[in-house]
Amino acid sequence: MTATAITLRIAQRDDAQAIALMSRDLIEAGLGWKYEPERIRRAMNDRETVTLVACDRSQLVGFAIMEFGEERAHLVLLAVRPSHRRHSVGRRLIEWLVDSVATAGLASIHLELRSSNEAARAFYRAMGFTETILVPGYYRGKESATRMVRVLRVPGPLPFNWRPPTLDKK
Ligand SMILES: CC(C)(COP(=O)(O)OP(=O)(O)OC[C@H]1O[C@@H](n2cnc3c(N)ncnc32)[C@H](O)[C@@H]1OP(=O)(O)O)[C@@H](O)C(=O)NCCC(=O)NCCS
């Protein structure tokens, strides 16, 4: 696998099963399966939610689900298959979403992860997120969560002369 062979695209209805199975096995293991295919399909149909997938040719190797609010975005789920880790797949998924959130003018991105998940914590730190608080029992009373945030701009109304950072670069 070479990183350049990986393509990103918006998820399609047929991807729901593969995404749900990845969530069950790679994110929710030991907690009970909450993100079943029907729930993933609902996320795909939600106009305020983006479901992004990474593919190695026809194989779905990673995905991320992000909810866009008025001022805050929430990263709901993110996973990369073990066979494709440490090849920047997660980085590319996050960077695509961060660019979209910044272009939309939102102020910050929030997420929760299992407090025991040191690999994900290191990954999110490398992606510019910082820890905020610990939430005991967040995962169905079984495990605590660590909240992390990445601030993109000062919260509050957008100034009149605000331009998306991606346009400012040009
Ligand atoms: C967390 C996860 C998405 C990272 O995906 P990935 O594609 O392997 O990450 P990348 O290759 O883009 O890593 C980017 C950087 O993050 C950091 N990083 C990633 N995985 C790491 C690990 N296991 N340990 C330490 N740092 C890590 C590194 O700085 C890495 O850069 P480098 O490879 O140049 O050193 C992946 O490990 C995963 O799917 N884990 C299981 C599901 C999960 O925990 N999801 C997040 C919580 S919902």
Image (cartoon, rainbow, N blue to C red):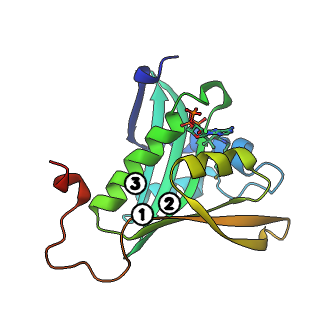
Vertically, is 132 above or below 44? below
Residue 89 % position (x, y): 51, 34
153 or 34: nearer the eye? 153
- Mark 3: give few (<14), some (14-19) or many (20+) Cα within 10 Å: many
The disc, 3 or 2, on the residue closer to the chain's N-terminal end is 2
Mark 2: amino acid: Arg
Vertically, is 164 above or below 27? below
| Spatial CA span between label 3 and label 2 | 22 Å
**Residue at 17% of width from left, 54% of height from top?**
167
- Mark 2: give few (<14), some (14-19) or many (20+) Cα within 10 Å: few
Identify the residue position indicated by label 1 in the image. 46
Identify the residue position indicated by label 2 in the image. 42
| Spatial CA span between label 2 and label 1 | 6 Å
Q: Residue furthest top?
A: 1
Residue 118 % position (x, y): 74, 48
Identify the residue position indicated by label 3 in the image. 98
For the image, the number of numbered tags is 3
Where disc 2 sits, the SS reads helix
59 or 138: nearer the eye? 138
Residue 19 % position (x, y): 58, 43
Whether residue 27 sits left or right of residue 102 in the image: it is right
Discs 3/2, front: 3
Residue 143 % position (x, y): 83, 64
Labels 2 and 1 touching (C-beta < 8 A): yes
